[in-house]
Image (spheres, helix red, strand yellow):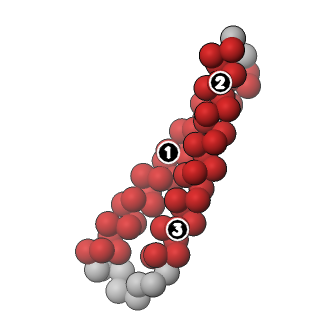
């Protein structure tokens, strides 16, 4: 059971880190006006990936809370 609690705490910390990354990406993306720019699109892909990771972590936390 301790391993699951450790994993749960890790997920919470990881979510905080991912949310900080999301804020950083948002600030970087706000600097662009040309949404067709390759650098903007790269940031956009990173943002989508980051958001997916956040969703996955919250899902795992939800599963752990059910048990």
Q: Residue at x 39, y 59 (%)?
A: 46
The residue to which callout 2 is attached is 6
The x and y percentages for residue 43 are: 38, 67
Q: Position of residue 24 (x, y in %)?
A: 52, 68
Relative to 7, 31 lies left or right: left
SS of the residue under disc 2: helix
Residue bearing mark 3: 24
* Residue drawn at 72 percent across, 16 percent down: 67
Residue 55 located left or right of residue 64: left
- Mark 1 falls on what kind of element? helix
Q: Quadrant of residue 56?
A: top right
| Coordinates of residue 29 in the picture (x, y in percent) | 45, 76
Q: CA distance from mark 2 to mark 1?
A: 19 Å
Q: Is residue 58 visible?
A: no
Image quarter in which the N terminus is found: top right
Q: Residues within 10 Å of mark 3 (few under 14, many from 20)?
A: few
Choose between 30 and 3: the one closer to the eye: 3
Within 10 Å of disc 1 (Cα), the crowding (few <14, some 14-19, many 20+) is some
Q: Nearer the viewer, mark 2 or mark 1?
A: 2
**Reading the chain from its start, which is encountered first: label 2 or label 1?**
2
Q: Residue at 57% x, 66% y: name it.
A: 23
Residue 53's label in the rendered image is 1
Label for residue 11? none
- Mark 1 or mark 3, whichever is nearer to me: 3
Residue farthest bottom in this picture: 33
Residue 18 percent location from the top left of the image: 55, 52
């Amino acid at each position: 059971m301790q391993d699951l609690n450790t994993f749960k705490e890790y997920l919470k910390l990881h979510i905080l880190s991912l949310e900080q990354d999301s804020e950083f990406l948002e600030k970087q993306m706000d600097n662009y006006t040309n949404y067709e720019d390759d650098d903007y699109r790269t940031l956009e892909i990173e943002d989508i990936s980051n958001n997916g990771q956040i969703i996955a972590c919250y899902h795992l936390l939800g599963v752990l809370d059910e048990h």
